[in-house]
Image (tube, helix red, strand yellow):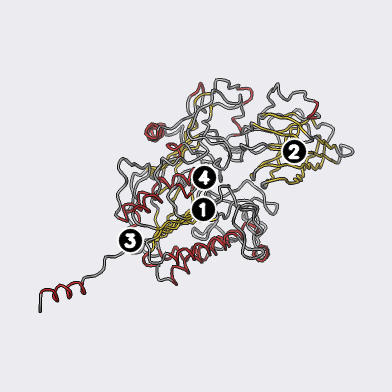
Amino acid sequence: MRPFLLFLCFLSFTPAPARPPNVVVILADDLGWSDTTLHGTTALHETPNLERLAKRGMTFTRAYSASPLCSPTRSALLTGLSPARTGVTTPSCHVPQVVLKATLPASAAPNQKAVQPTPPTRLGTEHRTLAEALKEAGYATAHLGKWHLGPEPYSPLEQGFDVDIPHHPGPSPAGSFIAPWKFAGFREKAPGEHIEDRMAAEAAAWMEQHRDGPFYLNYWMFSVHAPFDAKKAYIERHRARLDPADEQRSPTYAAMVQSMDDAVGTLLDTLDRLKLAESTVILFTSDNGGNMYDRVDGVPPTSNRPLRGGKATLFEGGTRVPAVIVWPGVTRPGSRSEALIQSEDYFPTLLEGLGLAAAEGQAFDGSSILPALKGEPLPGKAVFQYFPHSPGVPDWLPPAVSVHRDDWKLIRIFHGGDNGAHRHLLFHLREDPGERNNLSAALPERVKELDALIENFLSDTKAVVPVPNPKFDPAQHHPELEGRAVPKTKPRASAKDDGDPALQGWKARDCTAKVKAGVLRLTNLGDAAFLGLAAGRHGGLTTVKFRIQAAAGASHVDWLPAGVEGKARRVDFTLKDGWQEVVVELPAEGALGILRIYLPMQENPVELDWIEISSQKGGGPLRTTF
């Protein structure tokens, strides 16, 4: 045979190089560790498609988000960097004000021992993202769903993604999960369409378009974040299954979990149909723990039992999250792992597993967990959550940072001790998963050992850390509430609003108030902003109504009967975006005393045009029209 023909024969028998595997990252929003059927902790929620995913790969029982709130975790997953390093430590990336570096105010409210950093409101484009790395390696890239790391010029399109649908910078679906929506330039295809059904369909179509790959699909779900609404048929189905004694008894939330799980099923069906399942890495997790503190169907959305706390806390319920990784040829189908893993680990893991190098000079705060994916332990690995804030939720903690290593967890409360010293909470999670037994006093050497890890972490990340508050007033501090309830802020003087006749007796605290054209406009809102009124003549069962314009979020009304300082009672409510009328029922018995309407911390002004109070013992309604 001639040499040329021999060469052709050789070519005909030379196997084509295997193409790199596709990558699909599915990030649920506010989905708690106990919200799925992966861990045997729910009787109400049904997640058959997540179980189907778990049978294909590895379920991690000790996976953690980088933060108990969403934007910090999103930034960590995308960059492999801790929120301590990027400074993105709050979910404020949708506000108009552009802030790119964390700073430290000169002081804080007098009831706070520590001064909290002011975080960035955008993920800076100087941070190299997973999308940029994979795009440079020849991957098609797409982001679908929630972003919440900044609008243009900080949107997915500037962070390495070819496609962004629906190109929405907000913290939740625009208007509702059920169409009609209010997205700019993105409309429903049919009346009553569910946004998660639509996002999953868009993801399926995009994967089919790029089936010859490789591709990287970033599907960051809107589910199961507020606003709390769902398909009516799903709600009624779960309503019929409720156990009124169960801590998870919201049919609407169960329906939202079902739609989330449906979307996972759509992606799996598509990969199977396209015969891509064996060449696709799938990563599923959540951005933080379950939301226990809003109200839906008259009850909390969910419970993170047996874990303590929830979203916005550094207890386990705020940061331990469901996680499943499917990597054909690497993970054993149906396997489980107790290895400690965290959001920052996914970027370096994908690079190593795909045989890609980090960019020159690029470093990560996370580390590759490829050994764990192969079934090996990760002894001595430590993971950190940096959360230097104190949001007003039950299970409240002051600004803090935590470290997990092996079975131990240490929380450092910045300057929470005497004379500006730090205070610590130490838990052995295998023996005490509910974090009820603080061992810090009994095991000071263990505290010292783990706190040294925290100190090294903060130094390495160059974190902007809380400092002692020079304006701290011990008389306004309520340490007995820590970890059990929301700290109550005593009214503070404000020359701008005290005695303003336009407020008609209401006092604005931790914010600036101004009445114009019949609207009360509140700006510069702090994390304990409220409107207060001496409502002593009102008592018994009371209804508070008001019309308000604010961003979506959780808030509450409380009342403080005279002579019982520190024993305020509260009723929570949830706000949607835009103007709305809010009705809150207060089950008071005696006189209300001081009534306070707390306001959500946000960059945009909050506006009210009237407030009305009516009660059993207060005579006719008291209506304030501004």
Distance from Cα at disc 3 to Cα at disc 1: 32 Å
Cα gap from disc 2 to disc 3, whole angstroms:
55 Å
Can you give x and y, in whole percent of width and height, for residue 48 in the image? 52, 66
| Location of mark 2 (residue) | 608
Residue bearing mark 1: 33
- Residue 20 - label: 3
**Tag 1 or tag 3, which sits nearer the N-term?**
3
Q: Earlier in the sequence, mark 2 or mark 1?
A: 1
- The residue that appears at 78% across and 29% down in the rendered structure is 503
SS label for mark 4: loop
Foreground disc of the pair 4, 1: 4
Spatial CA span between label 2 and label 1: 37 Å
Precedes in sequence: disc 4 or disc 1: 1
Residues at marks 4 and 3 touching, judged by CB atoms closer than 8 Å? no
User: Which image quarter: residue 197?
Assistant: bottom right
Mark pair 4, 3: CA separation: 31 Å
Q: Nearer the viewer, mark 2 or mark 1?
A: 2
* Quadrant assignment, res 259: bottom right
In the picture, measured across the screen, residue 542 lies left or right of residue 452, that is right
Element carrying mark 2 = strand
Rate crowding at label 4 as few (under 14), some (14 to 19) or many (20 or more) other CA atoms within 10 Å. Answer: few
Amino acid type, mark 2: Leu
Residue type for callout 4: Glu
Q: Which residue is mark 4?
A: 152
